[in-house]
Image: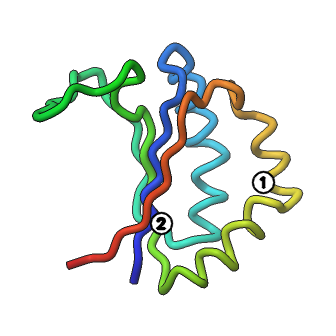
Amino acid sequence: MIYEIRNYHFEPSLMTEYKAWARESAVPHIRANVDLVGFWTNIDEQPEVTGRALDELGSATVTWIIRWPDIQTRHDTMAKIFATPEWNEISKGNPGRQHYHRIEVKFAEEL
């Protein structure tokens, strides 16, 4: 198994609208199509940081994790899911598609 960890630096001033859209539209669609471990948004609490300081964007405001059997399955599946007419319609409701300041995707394995 591998895990796809997706961190979004989404505009904090639009988080109320984003959470509603995610809860009502995006998460149910994602959950129906992949093995979604979880989908989280930050609470109003400062992050704890040790070592080097964060850059000007700070911590990611949205994180979600998908479990995949292997990286090839991920590559074969992900593009198909987010190219469907259903997802295109859902994404139109996103309150700020242009307000993703950074998206980070990394892949991890469980130890």
Label 1, label 2: how far apart the Cα atoms are? 17 Å
Q: Is residue 98 above or below residue 89?
A: above
Point out the image quarter for the N terminus: bottom left
Q: Which residue is mark 2?
A: 66
Q: How far across and how far down the image is residue 7, in percent?
A: 45, 45
Q: Residue 62: which quarter of the image?
A: top left
Res. 87 mark: 1
Name the image colouring. Answer: rainbow
Res. 73 mark: none
Point out the image quarter for the C terminus: bottom left
Determine the secondary structure under disc 1: helix
Q: Residue 29: which quarter of the image?
A: bottom right
Residue at 78%, 54% in the rendered image: 87
Query: The disc labelled 2 sits on which kind of residue?
Result: Ile
| Left or right, 45 with reference to 64 | left
Q: How far across and how far down the image is residue 89, in percent?
A: 84, 46
| Residue at the outermost top position | 13
Determine the secondary structure under disc 2: strand
